[in-house]
Amino acid sequence: SSDVCSSDLKDGYATWSPATNEIAFVSSRSGNGDVYVVDLKSKEVSQLSTSKQIDIFPEWFPNGNRLVYSSGDALNHDLYVVERGRRHEAWSKPVALTDWQHDDLRPTVSPDGRYVAFYADDVKGEGECGSWNVLVVPFLSGRTYRAEDLAGMVVAKDVAIDLNTGPAWSPEIGRAHV
């Protein structure tokens, strides 16, 4: 076995592209948790996120030219998307998919790439523990969903979250399985 990319720092949350010979992963090599992609043939590593926040849970879109991930601090993550026109083209700067005061974690993309499902906390109030909901948003390139949009996109309330896999999709496209 050989290293695909070497770093003395922590790498994790690896996910293989469904359409290209690339792996997206999170690494602390920049001093922060950022999203990277490694091309398995050339072993070239590209840094896709550079925020001061922690970026986690990268997830590919089916065409291999988009990634969605969570970015934030210990209490509030939003979802961001990076994309490119085709393989070997430059990746865009991250664009917010969600922007509100809830913790958005573990995005998963529908098999057709038209929707993103994720967990969002349902904060009850100062110091109170809340529950978690599953939301599904249509993916529209460049669109940022805010609180007034997202409040109506809850598909399941008070769920037990699985941060290893995130919400699952049923064979019927556009329906998240909870």
Image: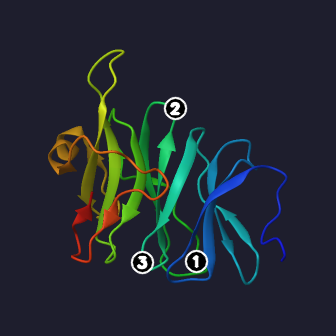
Q: Secondary structure under badge 1? A: loop
Q: Earlier in the sequence, mark 1 or mark 2?
A: 2
Q: In this image, 30 relative to 100: left or right?
A: right
**Disc 2 marks which amino acid?**
Ala
Q: Earlier in the sequence, mark 2 or mark 3?
A: 3
Q: Residue furthest left?
A: 152
**Disc 3 marks which amino acid?**
Pro
- Snapshot colouring: rainbow
Give how far apart the Cα atoms at labels 2 and 3 are.
29 Å
Tell me the residue that label 2 is attached to: 74
Task: Categorize mark 1 by other alpha carbons within 10 Å: few (<14), some (14-19), many (20+).
Answer: few
Give how far apart the Cα atoms at labels 1 and 2 are.
33 Å
Task: Categorize mark 3 by other alpha carbons within 10 Å: few (<14), some (14-19), many (20+).
Answer: some
Nearest to viewer (mark 1 / mark 2): 2
Q: Is residue 84 above or below residue 139?
A: below
Task: Categorize mark 2 by other alpha carbons within 10 Å: few (<14), some (14-19), many (20+).
Answer: few
**Disc 1 marks which amino acid?**
Glu
Q: Secondary structure under badge 2? A: loop
Residue 131 % position (x, y): 29, 34
Q: Residue at x 56, y 81 (%)?
A: 87
Q: Which quadrant: the C terminus?
A: bottom left
Based on the displayed image, in which of its 4 quarters is residue 11 positioned?
bottom right
Tell me the residue that label 1 is attached to: 89
Q: Residue at x 82, y 57 (%)?
A: 7
Question: Do residues under tags 2 and 3 come within 8 Å of each other at their CB atoms?
Answer: no
Q: Is residue 120 above or below residue 172?
A: above
Please tell me how many numbered marks the rendered image carries.
3
Residue 109 % position (x, y): 37, 66
Q: Residue at x 42, y 77 (%)?
A: 62
Tell me the residue that label 3 is attached to: 62
Q: Earlier in the sequence, mark 3 or mark 1?
A: 3
